Image: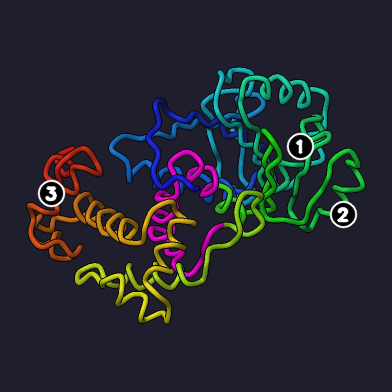
Amino acid sequence: MPVWTNTLEKPIKISFLLFDEFSNNSLGNCLEPLRASNSFLPKPVFEWQFLTLDGQSVQSSSGLPILPDGALSDMKRCDYLWVNSSYGYEQYGTAKTRVALQRAAKLTDTVIGLDTGAWVMAAAGLLTGKKATIHWDLFDSFADRFPMVDVERKRVVEDGNRITCAGAMSSFDLSLLIISKHLGQSSKVDLEAFFMRHDTGLIADTPQRNARDPLLNKALQLMRSHLENPLSRTSIAKQISCQAKTLDRRSIVEFGVPLGQVYRHIRLSAAQQLVTSTSLSIFEIALRTGFQNPSAMTRAYKARFGLTPTQNRQL
């Protein structure tokens, strides 16, 4: 059964390795969900740094300059190393890059390739005998160049401690996959709402799960559009032409909890965003998120976030 929420004992440490002409679209699609997920938590759990091979600045393919935190050789043990390259990937198949990546791979639990990062990883021998994907424009040439890699035309491919994704849009899917793996399915519900992906479900083509049940997608849309006056479970089921028990059963299969708990989570997440980003009174926020009074919201808020709304606003 999937985990709805999960509490981490220690931060997740991530190193982003950037090559010249890297895709800042891929980087942003990975980084922003991490940042946003931290904002939903009492304290941040994702920590990251930016590295380059030699510690010198690099530019994205659109000319955005990045001054890194250090060189790849300075990297300490971390949970994830994200290899981000785009154009010019073939020039990084050097002995120097190979040695540096092989050393770094021993200091991280999982290596992830973004866009053409799979090519750089394969050239360093980090994908030998592994399943992988790459930007689909390079699919055939990648398969020819690295016959020891089992290439799959998928958005995201996970094989043990190696993960690859096919491009900028799939890097967003990948980031949600990583976040939900550590924080639970509730984090995916929050992030889909935050990034306005209400009409989408779980990641297609991931090895763990199939795409979300269409009935649950419809239920989520209804719940998000009825925060101030929450719908009953029976009313939601009636509007999408199914039984309430069916919705609960499918919610437990998908999220690990009944639909009512998902609804309450969505309302509290909305309340937190209003608390931290607006000057609305606690009374007004309680009304806007479907609580009978500020006291009821405050109790639920503290149980979820560990702070009262007023305390959270003072941080």
Q: Position of residue 306 (x, y in %)?
A: 21, 37
Which residue position is annotated with label 1? 120
Q: Nearer the viewer, mark 3 or mark 1?
A: 3
Say which of 77 and 181 sits in front. Answer: 181
Question: Which SS class for mark 2?
Answer: helix
Looking at the picture, does residue 240 appear above or below residue 35? below
Q: Earlier in the sequence, mark 2 or mark 1?
A: 1
Question: Which SS class for mark 1?
Answer: helix
Name the quadrant of the C terminus: top left
Say which of 148 and 134 sits in front. Answer: 148
Mark 3, Cα crowd under 10 Å, few <14 / some 14-19 / many 20+, is: many
Q: Position of residue 138 (x, y in %)?
A: 81, 53
State the extent of the magenta-drawn residues as a range: 175-202
Q: Earlier in the sequence, mark 3 or mark 2?
A: 2
* Residue type at the position of mark 3: Thr
Q: Position of residue 9 (x, y in %)?
A: 39, 26
Q: Quadrant of residue 229?
A: bottom left
Q: Earlier in the sequence, mark 3 or mark 1?
A: 1
- At horizontal 40% and vertical 33% (from top left) the residue drawn is 45
- The reply to whether discs 2 and 1 touch (Cβ–Cβ < 8 Å) is no
* Residue type at the position of mark 2: Asp
Q: Quadrant of residue 168?
A: bottom right
**In this picture, residue 73 sits left or right of residue 255:** right
Question: Which SS class for mark 3?
Answer: helix
